[in-house]
Image (tube, rainbow, N blue to C red):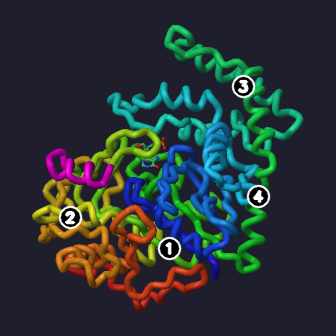
Amino acid sequence: MPGTCVIGLQWGDEAKGKLVDILTEEHDVVVRYQGGANAGHTVVSGGQTWKLSLIPSGILRDGVTCVVTGGVVLDPASVIREMDGLESRGVKIGRKLLLSDRAHVVFPWHVTEDRLLDGSLSGGEAIGTTGRGIGPCYRDKVGRSLAIRLGDLYRPDFREKLAHIVEVKNRLFAGWGGAAAGIQPLDAAAIHADYALHAARLEPHVADTTAFLLDEVEVGKRLLFEGAQGSLLDIDHGTFPFVTSSNSSGVGVSSGSGVPGRWVNRVIGVVKAYSTRVGGGPLPTEQINPIGEHLRERGREYGTVTMRPRRCGWFDAVAARYTARLSGVDHLAVMLLDVLSGLDEVKICSAYEIDGKRVTHFPSHVDDLKNARPVYETLPGWDEDLTEVRGYDDLPRQARAYLDRIGELLGRPVAIVSVGPDRAQTIFRHGASFGGGAATPPASTRPPHPSAAKV
Ligand code: IMP
């Protein structure tokens, strides 16, 4: 059974890129199946730092095919910029990159709509989007009549279809105040010229990726599915409406890629050793104080895409336990553990108090989450620098106790610990093998679910 899936269990930015890069070594195909240029991942490889957004980091390795599927919304200019950046540093892309002809295309009007409509929640609150046109593009996908997919750019009626959509969008924009409101009318001919150029550049990479992936799994190729954002930003299961517009939890793998779930035999849930969130919405364990500052500065918690400072707080085990179950996680990877060094004590939120009641389930309504008061367990901190530690048993006793408690609360073993950005700064525990063909441990070997444990 050939599929591994890497899913963020928090609000994104869990350092999944580093893990995907390590696991790529043992896979044949890396699959990006949702989101768009809102994602950003940083990979440190061969002493060089790479910042990627839509193209999987597998592109840095030979013999790996990188697939961007139909579940993704694709901004051609942004993909081309990434390709140029890689090629200018000597990375040969060739046929290693496949882009789905089913992927919906981001156009300039999507970016305009993103800018205009964020902040229009009742009460004037903003989702705080990345401004990359992601939500508006998915909205047009679901609405269907104003949508263009990558494969459409190569059809004879592309110009006509585009002209029709531009006309409709210009009418909508006029209704929103037009030029007086700072919205310039769209020029169909100019947009067509730009996108025809983009289409020509991308053409060698455009393919029916659903058929490709089904062929690959059926001949036993090992697939690595790379989730973007985090499970708590999932459109259906996250902290709605403060979410992204795709299924960023494990449930999105099949719908986004076209590969049935039966081909995914191992799910690695990635968490940071603490919590971060960028944009609006509740973050129950947020620390607006020197602890939060410590996490932001030590963890370099500034957005890869937007450079916004991230909001920081203690590890939220209520939220991560929910998403570990939702995404069907087998193993946990705890990233950025080194950032916690130097704190006298470390805290884990193991329950919420909502309206005077203590709960350990994650609320389905965002207002309940806004009212949630975290109930913390406090553990002793450690001073040691962890960045040179390479064995689990060499971690300070307090750090091991912290990890053990996270594993216990989430009901899954902590199999991987990261203590720095470099590939070498990674600890594999339990002699864990992460080759593409390794089987999922039988349920009986997993620790009990924490509803059965003390919380
Ligand atoms: P959008 O995906 O640009 O529509 O933004 C919706 C929400 O998801 C905002 O709060 C963003 O900050 C957040 N978001 C989107 N992509 C990422 C990501 O890759 N990491 C962290 N947060 C993200």
Which amino acid, mark 3? Ile
Q: CA distance from mark 3 to mark 2?
A: 51 Å
Q: Is mark 1 within 8 Å of ligand 1?
A: no
Q: Is residue 236 visible in this depiction of the protein? A: no
How far apart are the alpha carbons under marks 3 and 4?
27 Å
Q: Residue furthest top?
A: 180
Label 2, label 4: how far apart the Cα atoms are: 44 Å
- Residue under pointer 2: 341
**Mark toward the start of the polypeptide (3 vs 4):** 4
Q: Which mark is drawn over residue 95?
A: 4
2 or 4: tag closer to the N-terminus: 4
State the residue at coordinates (75%, 56%).
Answer: 94
Report x, y in % for residue 78: 61, 40
Identify which residue is drawn at 22% across, 62% down. 340
| Residue name at image x 20 percent, y 64 percent | 341
Q: Point out the stretch of residues depicted in magenta.
A: 287-300
Up the image or down, 398 lies above or below 98; here it is below
Identify the residue under disc 3: 191
